[in-house]
Amino acid sequence: MIPYQIDKKEYIDTTKNNSVLLIKRDFSYEIMLDLTRRLTTSYNSELKIWSGASEPSSYSNDLTIGEIIFEQLQKDPERVCQISHSEKTSLTRSQLLENASKIGAYLRQEGFIKETDIVTILARNTTHVASLAYGCMFNGTPFHTIHPDTIDNTIYHLLNITKPRIIFCGAESYNKLKYVADKMNIENKQLAMKIVIIDGIMEGVTNILDIFQIQLQSNYKPESFKNGIDRTLAILCSSGTTGTPKAVTISNSRKIFEFYRYLGESDIQYSPSSLDWVTGLLVLITTGVYRTLRIISKEAFSVTSFLALCEEYKITWTLVSTPYISKLISGPEINAKQLRTIRYILFGGDRSLSETLEKMQSYLQFEGILHQVYGLTEMGCGATCNLGPKSKLTSAGLIQPNIRMRIVSESGEVLGPNEQGELHCHLGQHWGGYYDNIPETREIQDSEGWIHTGFQ
């Protein structure tokens, strides 16, 4: 049963380009039907476990996400895959593939072989961040992402956890990072961190553009690993709501992108999140896997800039935090014409009022565009999805495929429906936990692999 009614009435647009809109509407309608079939939740009354749909992956467990993206980037090489609005740059698939391959080759030359050889990225959404991240993926090198506005003491704390050998940063962050790196190099005599500029110019400092000048062998291929799906892909910062941020490992799990398999070459993606958020990582990966066009900007989110991006680039898919929805509907400049191309708005991070979603819905072509997603960084993916403002807003939605959940009391008893306790989530595969922090990992994940989300 479809949990909401999709409006199939004719939509009249001021551009009079009704034929295009009708095609898009029918396309989205079919996609939404597919999503409602995939978002099914079953309950095992004996085990007291709720489960999402069981979906087989399209990829071998030995493949890393880097290998998957490497193959996809070779298709339609002259197609533009990234546009930076703030920098006025664009990259074709072949350019991004070449740059990322050179990063992968450079890291291999620098001796990045082990899973503990870490790269840190401290940068906004700028032109070459995607090449850097993909290059790390190609080499099997985990990258630790930190937001550029993070204070010095927290950066020092986080770098002391992962001890990266190379830090890539914008020129604006160089002096701050140089101070932290020099301090760590003195305290850890065997540690020597190199800084590379990824955005801007610092005289006498290695620039990512220098790396792009190296000669790449024609037979370059990404590194392969047994059970590549379990290898650490990235390390993100926890939210810090329970104290100093921890370093959360993210594996090469298919769950970060396979729920969004409806994406395709006709989609244009945008999210204000940079790579230090799992949402930013999700968009970067889905762009590579599904060959979409990704729009990026160095600027922080604002109602004016978001609406301008939607109108200029004809955004079809966007991922934002829940408070941004409230900001959008409060902006006097919002109108349906600016949002006419959007097929999916994913939002999460907080609950939303029904009035807010209903007002947002009034600016959209049809129902089924608003998708509220719940999850946590430690899972590396969304856990549930609630479709549309007419669905049950007091619910977290339906469980995404291949994820299981249960409710547990403070005494450890597994509870049934309509009982209150702690939510446990199971990914069905290996999670590396918090980097170099076994005690905290054991605190959040039990011996059976259940991730404990905490009591509210």
Image (spheres, grey):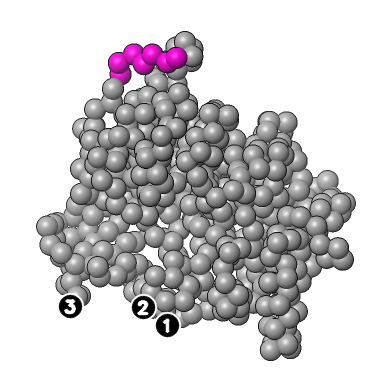
Task: From the image, tell me which residue sits under label 1.
Answer: 439
Task: From the image, tell me which residue sits under label 3.
Answer: 411
Task: From the image, tell me which residue sits under label 2.
Answer: 443
| Placement of the N terminus among the 4 image quadrants | top left
Mark 2, secondary structure of its residue:
helix
Asked if one can make out residue 324 in the rendered structure from this viewpoint, the answer is yes
Asked if one can make out residue 68 in the rendered structure from this viewpoint, the answer is no
Quarter of the figure with residue 327? top left
Mark 1, secondary structure of its residue:
helix
Q: Residue furthest left?
A: 418
Q: Is residue 428 above or below residue 448?
A: above
Q: Residue furthest front?
A: 332
Q: Residues within 10 Å of mark 1 (few under 14, many from 20)?
A: few
Q: Residue at x 61, y 63 (%)?
A: 148
**The residue under label 2 is which amino acid type?**
Glu
Q: Position of residue 314 (x, y in %)?
A: 54, 28
Q: Position of residue 254 (x, y in %)?
A: 48, 51
Q: Identify the magenta region.
A: 8-14
| Among the two numbered marks 1 and 3 on one chain, the one whose residue lies closer to the N terminus | 3
**Mark 2 touches mark 1? (CB < 8 Å):** yes
Q: Nearer the viewer, residue 392 or 251?
A: 392
In the rendered image, residue 9 lying in the magenta stretch gets the answer yes
Q: Residue at x 57, y 56 (%)?
A: 275
Q: Position of residue 297 (x, y in %)?
A: 61, 45
In the rendered image, residue 279 lying in the magenta stretch gets the answer no
**The residue under label 1 is which amino acid type?**
Pro
**The residue under label 3 is which amino acid type?**
Ser
Is residue 321 left or right of 309 when viewed as pictured?
left
Which mark is on residue 392? none
Q: What is the CA distance from the residue labelled 2 to the residue labelled 3? A: 15 Å
Q: Residue at x 46, y 44 (%)?
A: 319
